Amino acid sequence: MGMSLLNEYINKNLTRGIPVTDDMRKIKADDIANELCNHTRWRSHGRPIKIEDLEKIGLEINRLENNPGLAIIVQRIRVVTRLLFSNLNRQRL
């Protein structure tokens, strides 16, 4: 299921501002999805994937440092999430 969702997302959002056919989009989406699902390369779900590695496999990354307005929004969401989860009553066994 993860592979099909990833493929669908990439296929829908892969353009880079140049004209592409549906076949080109599908082939590229398949290539990227296969690469991201390569457990031999990435080894674990708990390990982060570096931006440079994502760019090498053909993804275009919009970096937060290049968009200060978006960076502020993301930071605020992080703070609220931390506050929310740090103040929840925890059940101890």
Image (tube, rainbow, N blue to C red):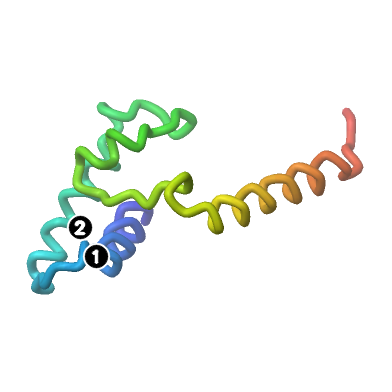
For residue 29, which numbered disc appears in the image?
A: 2
Which quarter of the image is occupied by the N terminus? Answer: bottom left
Q: Given the image, on which type of amino acid does mark 2 rest?
A: Ala
User: x and y percent of residue 4 in the render?
Assistant: 30, 59
Instruction: Estimate how packed mark 2 is, as few (under 14), some (14 to 19) or many (20 or more) residues with alpha carbons within 10 Å.
Output: many
**Would residue 64 be found to the left or right of residue 56 on screen?**
right
**Residue at figure coordinates x 35%, y 26% from the top left:** 43
Residue displayed at 27% across by 59% down: 7
Report the residue at 30% width, 32% height from top: 39
Location of residue 21 (image quadrant): bottom left
Q: Position of residue 60 (x, y in %)?
A: 27, 51
Q: Specify the quadrant of the image occupied by residue 85.
A: top right
* Residue in the foreground of this view, choosing between 69 and 20: 69
Q: Measured from the top left, where is residue 83 in percent x and y?
A: 81, 44
Looking at the picture, how far across and down is residue 61, in whole percent? Answer: 33, 49
Closer to the camera in the image, 65 or 25 = 65
Hey, what amino acid is under mark 1?
Asn
Kindly indicate the quadrant of the structure image that contains residue 5.
bottom left
**Regarding mark 2 in the picture, which secondary structure is present there?**
helix
Figure check: 25 above or below 73: below
Nearer to the camera, 66 or 47: 66
Between the residue at mark 1 and the residue at mark 2, the CA separation in whole angstroms equals 5 Å
Secondary structure found at label 1: helix
Please give the residue where the numbered disc 1 appears in the rendered image: 11
The answer to whether the residue labelled 1 contacts the one labelled 2, judged by CB atoms less than 8 Å apart, is yes
